[in-house]
Image: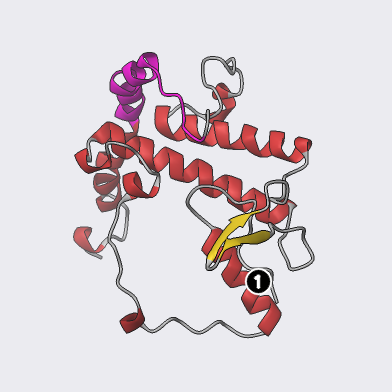
Amino acid sequence: AVGGFHELMEGYGFDDKDLHARLELHSGQEPRSIPSHWLEVIRHGDEERAGLDRARQRGGLEGSLGLATLRAARLGNRLLAAHRPWGRTRPASRYEEIAPGCWRVVPASPPRLPAETDRKIAHAQRLAFWSCFLAIPEIFLAELPVKLVPHPRQGRWPVRWWHRLWWRSGRRLLQAPVMLLSLGRGQLAAMRPGDKANGP
């Protein structure tokens, strides 16, 4: 009745929330939870969710890549849900049975985004990924050439040696003031008038 999962969404994130919201809107009530004994949960971190090749190493760099990939995918899927809401009236993929119990998608049937919408979402995802991975504010990233902070290629973000160098050096320098402020936050809170630690 709601058209299933949003077929235009890619990567990890927000597809389940989108389906949940449409089910709730259609039925007028909160969808019931799947009983826990029906499922076996496979625990996984951001690296596995993002499909990184070296996910099991769980290094700092791989973790940052995983988080940046997730944030870009989630943002893209949220924008898709807002700009191209899904439903059963939307053109969806069609399947054909090529052997008993064996199905394949009809090649020309998967839906595609209008070029302008695709371009806007790709731009937002590019800024979200590099902003998260390099810790550079989006307002500055928008001024950098696309060649330096490019779009993904075949579903993978092209992280080059200079990106890795910045992650290990410049990114840490940008983090230093934030770390200092967070360390001082507890001391500032203790100095507030009327704080229990300072008495009445």
Image coloring type: secondary structure
Q: Name the kind of residue labelled 1 in the image.
A: Arg
Residue 162, visible in the rendered structure: yes
Looking at the image, which is closer to me, 10 or 141? 10
Q: Over which residues does the magenta segment extend?
A: 155-177
Looking at the image, which is closer to me, 5 or 138? 5
Q: Is residue 42 magenta?
A: no
Q: Residue at x 27, y 60 (%)?
A: 43
Quick one: SS at disc 1? helix
Please identify the quadrant where the N terminus is shown: bottom right
Looking at the image, which is closer to me, 29 or 40? 40
Mark 1 residue crowding within 10 angstroms, few (<14) / some (14–19) / many (20+): many
Residue 152 locus on image (x, y percent): 53, 30
Q: In which quarter of the image is residue 140?
A: top right
Prevailing SS of the magenta stretch: helix
184 on left or right of 137: left
Q: Is residue 147 placed above or below 28 in the rendered structure?
A: above
Q: Is residue 168 placed above or below 46 in the rendered structure?
A: above
